Image (cartoon, coloured by chain):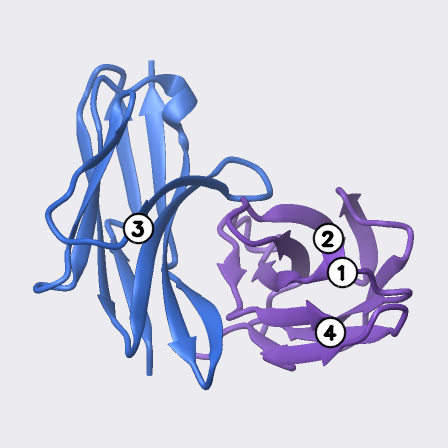
Chain colours: A purple, B blue
C-alpha cells in the first residue's frame, strides 16, 4: 500500500537560506500534519491542513509557512534558517472524511542548518 | 523495505485492566525503538529502547525490547480513561548516512470507565 512520501529525505542548508519541504499524503487522505522533532525531543506539532485550508496551527515560527495544494500534497517553506531549525521534519496524513483519527507518518526530512 | 507492524490495531478495555501492545519490525541498520502516545496531535515520547532485555518503566507503563526476535511490547497496568490514545511504535534506522523514523500504524486504545 502507498505510504506518505516526503522529499527531500536529507537537506543541508546554511544560515539565512530558505528551504522547501514536500509531503505527499496517502491517496484519498485529505488532511496533512507537519511535525518538527529536534534531537532527543518529542515531535512538536507545527501546522495542519484539511482540504487545502489550514485547520490548526501549533508552534510554527513566523519564518515558516505552509500550504496544501489541490492534489493534497503540502509544502513547508522555511526562510531565514537558523541553526536551531536543524531537526527531523515529518508529516503525517489522515482521512477526515472517513472519520479516521490515525495519522500515518512519512519517513521524515532531516534538515541540517550549518 | 523497512517495516514496523503494530498489533492490535484497536483495543477496547475497561478501567483497571492490563493491556499489552505489540510492535514487530524488519529493518536494516536498527538504531533504537521508540514508543509514542498520541492523543490529539503531536505524539508524546514514552520510551526509547536500544538494548534487549532491559525493561524501561514509567509509572504504570513499561516496555521491553527483544532484538533477537525483533519485537517490543508496551504494557500498561491498571488502565485509566486517560490512557485512551493511539500508541505509536517507531524504529530509528540509518540509511545512507541519515536517520529516519519508521513508524507503525499505531494501536488505538480505548479505556472505558
Q: Is residue B112 left or right of residue A82?
A: left
Report the chain holding disc 4.
Answer: A
Split into 4 quadrants, where in the image is the N terminus of chain B? bottom left
Badges 4 and 2, same chain:
yes
Q: Check the image and report above or below for A35 versus B31.
A: above
Which of disc 1 and disc 4 is earlier in sequence? 4
Residue A50 visible to the viewer: no
Q: Quadrant of residue B80?
A: top left
Label 4 residue SS: strand
For residue A21, the mark is 4
Label 1 residue SS: helix
Q: Residue at x 49, y 51 (%)?
A: A102
Which circle, 2 or 3, is nearer the viewer?
Answer: 2
For residue B67, the mark is none
Label 3 residue SS: loop
Could you give the CA–CA distance between mark 3 and mark 1, rounded to whole angstroms? 39 Å
Cβ atoms under marks 4 and 3 closer than 8 Å: no
Could you give the CA–CA distance between mark 2 and mark 3, rounded to whole angstroms? 24 Å
* Residue identified by numbered label 1: A83
Q: Is residue B81 left or right of residue B70?
A: right
Q: Residue at x 70, y 78 (%)?
A: A12
Could you give the CA–CA distance between mark 1 and mark 2, rounded to whole angstroms? 24 Å
Q: Residue at x 77, y 77 (%)?
A: A13
Q: Residues within 10 Å of mark 3 (few under 14, many from 20)?
A: some
Split into 4 quadrants, where in the image is the C terminus of chain B? top left
* Residue identified by numbered label 3: B9
**In front: B1, or A14?**
A14
Amino acid at each position: 500500500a502507498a505510504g506518505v512520501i516526503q522529499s527531500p529525505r536529507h537537506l543541508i542548508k546554511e544560515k539565512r537560506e530558505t528551504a522547501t519541504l514536500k509531503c505527499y499524503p496517502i491517496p484519498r487522505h485529505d488532511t496533512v500534519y507537519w511535525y518538527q522533532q529536534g534531537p532527543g525531543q518529542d515531535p512538536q506539532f507545527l501546522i495542519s491542513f484539511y482540504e487545502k485550508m489550514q485547520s490548526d496551527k501549533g508552534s510554527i515560527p513566523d519564518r515558516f509557512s505552509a500550504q496544501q495544494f489541490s492534489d493534497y500534497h503540502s509544502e513547508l517553506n522555511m526562510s531565514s534558517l537558523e541553526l536551531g531549525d536543524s531537526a527531523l521534519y515529518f508529516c503525517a496524513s489522515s482521512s477526515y472524511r472517513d472519520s479516521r483519527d490515525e495519522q500515518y507518518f512519512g519517513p521524515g526530512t532531516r534538515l541540517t542548518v550549518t | 523495505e523497512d517495516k514496523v507492524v503494530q498489533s492490535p490495531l484497536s483495543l477496547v478495555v475497561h478501567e483497571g485492566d492490563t493491556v499489552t501492545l505489540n510492535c514487530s519490525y524488519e529493518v536494516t541498520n536498527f538504531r533504537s525503538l521508540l514508543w509514542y502516545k498520541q492523543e490529539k496531535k503531536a505524539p508524546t515520547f514514552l520510551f526509547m529502547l536500544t538494548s534487549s532485555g532491559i525493561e524501561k518503566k514509567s509509572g504504570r507503563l513499561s516496555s521491553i525490547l527483544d532484538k533477537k526476535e525483533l519485537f517490543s511490547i508496551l504494557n500498561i497496568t491498571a488502565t485509566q480513561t486517560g490512557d485512551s490514545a493511539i500508541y505509536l511504535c517507531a524504529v530509528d534506522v540509518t540509511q545512507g548516512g541519515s536517520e529516519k523514523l519508521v513508524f507503525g500504524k499505531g494501536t488505538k486504545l480505548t479505556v472505558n470507565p
